[in-house]
Amino acid sequence: MIYWELFLAFFIPGILGYGGGPASIPLVEYEVVAKYQWMTVEEFSEVLALGNALPGPIATKMAGYIGYEVGGVFGAVVGVFATVAPSLILMIALLGLLYKFKDSPKVKNMTALVRPTIAILLGVLTYRFLESSYVGAGIWHTLFLIIASFLLLEKWKVHPAFVIVGGLGYGAIFLSF
Amino acid sequence: MKTHINLFIAFFRSGILGFGGGPSAIPLVHKEVVTTFKWMNDDEFSDVLALGNTLPGPINTKMAGYIGYHVAGVLGMINAVLSSIVPSILMMIVLLTTLTTFKDQPWVVGMTRGVIPIVVVMMAVLTWDFFKKSNQGLGWKISVTLLLVSFLLIELVHIHPGIVIALLLAYALLKPNKQKNEEIERQKGTN
């Protein structure tokens, strides 16, 4: 039962996430936090933070770790399989058909039309993280960390792994109350 | 065997050096597949990338799987996919389970608090990215309308986001292609 739920939780975001792994983040969050309640928003944001600090595709890192948390090694295998296999099998099976459509405006329309919805989902998720940070760390630490990490990441182009390690260190020292 | 070792090297390297999710690792995959191991030329690679984009799901594993299949059949596919994802999944599990073992320690609680605002920034940047691209792709009127409608449906009416996306995809597939028809009309006119 748990494995079937794990399969569904990662199959749905995998099959609907147009625009690569990052587009499926809010869809995964919906299944994992809102629907099956395997994790809280804070735990999920921690998974995202470390996922961003480590290399490799983000969707499979989330599926692997969450699958492992929920159902052990086999859970990890199910989560990753549900993320990767459906679209890969489609790609290999439908190769000839896809070739005809790869320059079709319809395909471009599909990607373009779902973008606003993904943007909303990402925006809502961002807001929920902000809320949980406000509750956990308080307004001043939250503001300071947001401004500092925005400058580091976007203005000075510091590697995200260093910024996240910095945030972990800052939190261990100043936020362990 | 040599081919399989090369597949492993190519996808291990591009997986372990790519930060920021699958799409940002595509140039690294390109370098391995086209420049280093010459399994494909530039055109073939961009064809595979375009094909991958016609389907949903993570792009990196679709690329790895297809290229692995192209080079060495089903075993090649499995090898390439696993090489690109397993190392980072293992690191993730080791790191996070270590952290959760100490989750009652105040400094670990602090670490989580310290990292959430950074995730806020990363997610906000990603949101802004999608918002900008959706304005470019659809024009701001349609884009903002769709934004509001999705917000209403998902957050206020509580419809599963998957259903909203599935409906949009179905609409894009079934909608008659206006531009093409206009072109045909124009060609008829000139004939």
Image: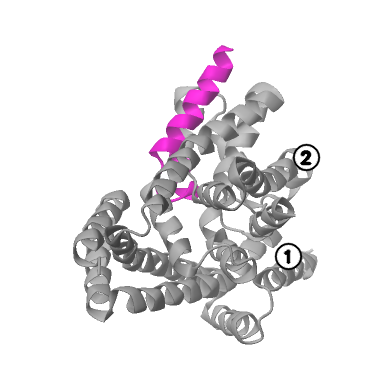
**Per the image, is B2 magenta?**
yes
Query: What residue span does the magenta drawing correspond to?
Result: B1-28
Q: Is residue B38 visible?
A: no
Q: Residues within 10 Å of mark 2 (few under 14, many from 20)?
A: few
Q: Which residue is mark 1?
A: B180
Secondary structure type for disc 2: helix
Q: Chain of mark 2?
A: A
In which image quadrant can residue B144 be found? bottom right
Report the predominant secondary structure element of the magenta stretch.
helix
Secondary structure type for disc 1: helix
* Image spot of residue A116 (x, y percent): 56, 73
Q: CA distance from mark 1 to mark 2?
A: 28 Å
* Image spot of residue B45 (x, y percent): 56, 36
Q: Chain of mark 1?
A: B
Q: Is residue B158 above or below residue A28?
A: below
Is A126 on the left-hand or right-hand side of A70? left
Quadrant of the drawing holding the C terminus of chain A:
bottom left
Q: Residue A93 bears which disc, if any?
A: 2
